[in-house]
Amino acid sequence: MRILAVTLVALAAGSASFADDKPGAWLEPGARVAGTLGLLYNVTGLDVYHERYHCLLTDYGLDPTVMIVVRGADQLENPSVVKLLQEIDTAVGKNTVKRLHAFVVVLDPSINDIVKDDAARYKLEKKLDAFAKDKLGKGTPMALCLCTEGQMDKFPLDKDVQVALVFYNNHRVALSKTFAKDQISDDEAMKTVKDGLGKILPAK
């Protein structure tokens, strides 16, 4: 079964190392990725978690994983972002034996309180559900989760970042990359995916 989960992960306090001196980098290689965040509203995905608050980080354990953060649901209309997610989705499907997982964090400014902002959450639910059905692999239990910027305090992103990726295995960062608005291109996205997967997937 192939799983491309969209969710948010908090880094354990004191465990993150940020690569401020490396353009485009986000987390230092070797930094520990850990922690949980309960207020993640699963819009789609496995039935047991559908329309519930659930952190998917623990589901993947120590397996090789790709985390993608997309800031603003409107970025899902960016062709390069769509291509990026499709490429990773395909990789997950081809590497189930190697236990590859991927999940995406979608943050949107229309939601200030994930529990109380029912109208905004409902509107985004419809958009993310349509995206999963239209753009990603058929039959994939795609868990799209909604969260807020306020819950990112242990996992900060620069204000200009629109898309961020981290490839990790055994809860340790192998590669990270960030893209500002309109900075991401098909070629750069594909190169990042190729380089990142090469660092976390076993050779055989």
Image: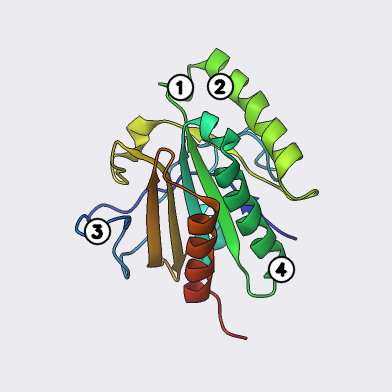
Q: Tag 2: residue type? A: Arg
The tag on residue 121 is 2
Query: What is the spatial separation of the Cα atoms under label 1 and label 4, in whole angstroms?
Result: 35 Å
Q: Are marks 1 and 2 in contact (CB under 8 Å)?
A: yes
Residue 94: numbered disc: 4
**Which residue is outermost to the left?**
21
Mark 4 closeness class: few <14, some 14–19, many ≥20 residues within 10 Å = few
Mark 1 neighbour class, 10 Å CA radius: few under 14, some 14 to 19, many 20 or more: some
Q: Is residue 155 rendered to the left or right of residue 112? A: left
Where residue 83 sits: x, y (%)? 62, 49
Task: Give the colour scheme shown.
Answer: rainbow
Residue shown at 32% from the left, 46% from the top:
155
Which amino acid type is marked by label 1? Ile
Q: CA distance from mark 4 to mark 3?
A: 31 Å
Q: Can you tell which of label 1 and label 3 is closer to the viewer?
A: 3
Task: Indicate the amino acid at tag 4.
Answer: Lys
Residue 123 visible: yes
Which of the pair 67/176 is nearer the observer? 176
Say which quadrant the C terminus sits in. Answer: bottom right
Disc number for residue 111: 1
Mark 1 and mark 4 residues within 8 Å of each other at the beta carbon? no
| Residue at which label 3 appears | 19
